[in-house]
Amino acid sequence: MKYACGVEGMTTWCSGAGCLPSRPDVAEAMDVESDPVWKVHSEMTSIAIPWQLEDTCSIINSAYQNFLPLAVSGELSAQEAMQQADEQANSEIANAD
């Protein structure tokens, strides 16, 4: 784990997998700023916010796990499934307090 999260390991992984590194020093080592596609993503990290609210990530995950199979099977459209997952998650989060 230490290697994978270190500069060398993350550089190897991100370069091979084509993903943006989470470490600024790795982004610098990979020179992501020279690639116009990666540069846009890299610049957005300065204004990014977490998509989960506090410790509700498991609630959100469960809601999407409940409805994704229905979209894949065709029982619901993708839009319907995501809307219902959002409604379930938001309801559970509101009632979790």
Image (cartoon, helix red, strand yellow):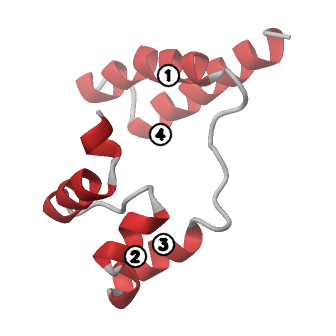
At horizontal 35% and vertical 20% (from top left) the residue drawn is 70
Provide the residue designation for mark 4. Answer: 79
Q: Quadrant of residue 12?
A: bottom left
Neighbor class of circle 3 (other Cα within 10 Å; few <14, some 14-19, many 20+) is some
Provide the residue designation for mark 3. Answer: 42
At horizontal 79% and vertical 9% (from top left) the residue drawn is 96
Q: Position of residue 65 (x, y in %)?
A: 41, 18
Work out whether 21 lies above or below 31: above
Task: Label 1: state its secondary structure.
Answer: helix
Of residue 88 and residue 74, the one placed in the foreground of this image is 88
The mark found on residue 28 in the picture is: 2
**Mark 3 and mark 1 in contact (Cβ < 8 Å)?**
no
Assign the N terminus to one quadrant of the image. Answer: top left
Single out the mark in the foreground, 1 or 2: 2
Single out the mark in the foreground, 1 or 3: 3
The CA span between labels 1 and 3 is 26 Å
Provide the residue designation for mark 1. Answer: 61
- Of pointers 4 and 1, the one earlier in the residue sequence: 1
Single out the mark in the foreground, 2 or 3: 2
At horizontal 37% and vertical 59% (from top left) the residue drawn is 21
The CA span between labels 2 and 4 is 38 Å
Single out the mark in the foreground, 2 or 4: 2
Task: Label 3: state its secondary structure.
Answer: helix
Q: Amino acid at mark 2?
A: Glu
Q: Amino acid at mark 4?
A: Gln
**Mark 2 and mark 1 in contact (Cβ < 8 Å)?**
no
- Of pointers 1 and 3, the one earlier in the residue sequence: 3
Task: Label 4: state its secondary structure.
Answer: helix
The CA span between labels 4 and 1 is 17 Å
Q: Position of residue 88 (x, y in %)?
A: 63, 18
